[in-house]
Structures are given as structure tokens and as C-alpha cells.
Image (spheres, rainbow, N blue to C red):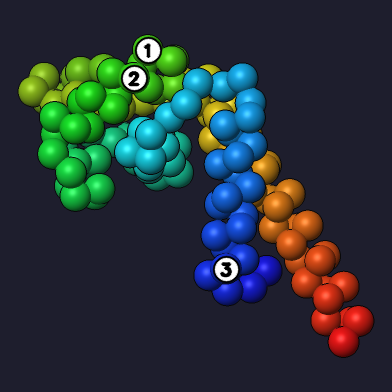
């Protein structure tokens, strides 16, 4: 797949449209961003760490996590080693959501690659 911005935006567009058309609850970009960091990072995330990584305030992270927890896409626990620290953990529902996004993006990228190959071969 090419790193052409127009193609990448088409993949993002198709993914967003797929989510909007589904029966899944709508998430904000912040909520999706937080979920992706939580699910794609190897280490457990803290609210403080997420705020720093995303360059947003801890209160914004907390509000986004309120919604993610409500939808059972993430959960918070207290760090046993430091009771002042809150860890953000993955859930089965969140894993399904991230996998769904990845699947849609992968299908769109493959379709785009096939279309691009066909376009090039006809010129």
C-alpha cells in the first residue's frame, strides 16, 4: 500500500463510515485515540501517561475513559504498587472494537491496492 495521503484518507473515511453505519456506539476521536494507545502499547497505561502521550489534560482522559468504561471498552484499576496511580486496562469488548477497526482498514487497503494495480495496468 502506498503512503499517499489521499489513499490513506480514503481508508480512514471508509473506516469511519463503516463505524457510523454499524450498530456500534459512536466514539469521539479522543476516545478512539485513547483506546488505540491502550490496546497497541505493550505496557499498561496510566491516566497520567495517556494525558502526556496524547498531549491532553488528565481530566479530558478521565472523561473519555468514563465513556469507554460505560461501553465496556476499557476499565480502570488502582495500581497496587502506587495507590495514587490509576491503570487503564483492556476489556474483551475493547479488543473486539480494535480488531473490527483493523479488519475494516485492512479490507479497504487491500481493495485500494487492487484498484490501484488495475488502474496502473490499464494505462
Frontmost of labels 3 and 1 is 3
* Helix, strand or loop status at disc 2: helix
Report how far apart the C-alphas of labels 3 and 2 lie in the structure: 31 Å
Residue, disc 1: 70
Frontmost of labels 3 and 2 is 3
- Is any atom of residue 68 visible in this view? yes
Q: Residue at x 82, y 65 (%)?
A: 114
Residue 119, numbered circle:
none
Looking at the figure, which quarter contains the N terminus? Answer: bottom right
* Helix, strand or loop status at disc 3: helix
Looking at the figure, which quarter contains the C terminus? Answer: bottom right
Residue, disc 3: 6
Report how far apart the C-alphas of labels 3 and 1 lie in the structure: 35 Å
First-in-chain label (3 vs 1)? 3
Q: Residue at x 81, y 66 (%)?
A: 115
Q: Residue at x 8, y 23 (%)?
A: 84
Crowding near pointer 1: few (<14 within 10 Å), some, many (20+)? Answer: few
Residue, disc 2: 67
* Helix, strand or loop status at disc 1: helix
- Is any atom of residue 38 visible in this view? no
| Residue 102 placement (x, y as % from top left) | 61, 43
Describe residue 122's horizontal placement relative to residue 115 as left or right.
right
| Residue 16 placement (x, y as % from top left) | 56, 41
- Kindly indicate the quadrant of the structure image that contains residue 67: top left
Amino acid at each position: 500500500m502506498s503512503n499517499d495521503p489521499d489513499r490513506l484518507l480514503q481508508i480512514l473515511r471508509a473506516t469511519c463510515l463503516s463505524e457510523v453505519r454499524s450498530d456500534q456506539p459512536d466514539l469521539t476521536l479522543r476516545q478512539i485515540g485513547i483506546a488505540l494507545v491502550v490496546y497497541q502499547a505493550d505496557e499498561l497505561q496510566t491516566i497520567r501517561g495517556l494525558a502526556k502521550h496524547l498531549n491532553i489534560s488528565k481530566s479530558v482522559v478521565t472523561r473519555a475513559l468514563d465513556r469507554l468504561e460505560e461501553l465496556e471498552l476499557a476499565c480502570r484499576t488502582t495500581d497496587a504498587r502506587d495507590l495514587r496511580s490509576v491503570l487503564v486496562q483492556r476489556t474483551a469488548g475493547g479488543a473486539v472494537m480494535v480488531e473490527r477497526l483493523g479488519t475494516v482498514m485492512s479490507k479497504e487497503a487491500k481493495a485500494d491496492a487492487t484498484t490501484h494495480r488495475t488502474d496502473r495496468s490499464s494505462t
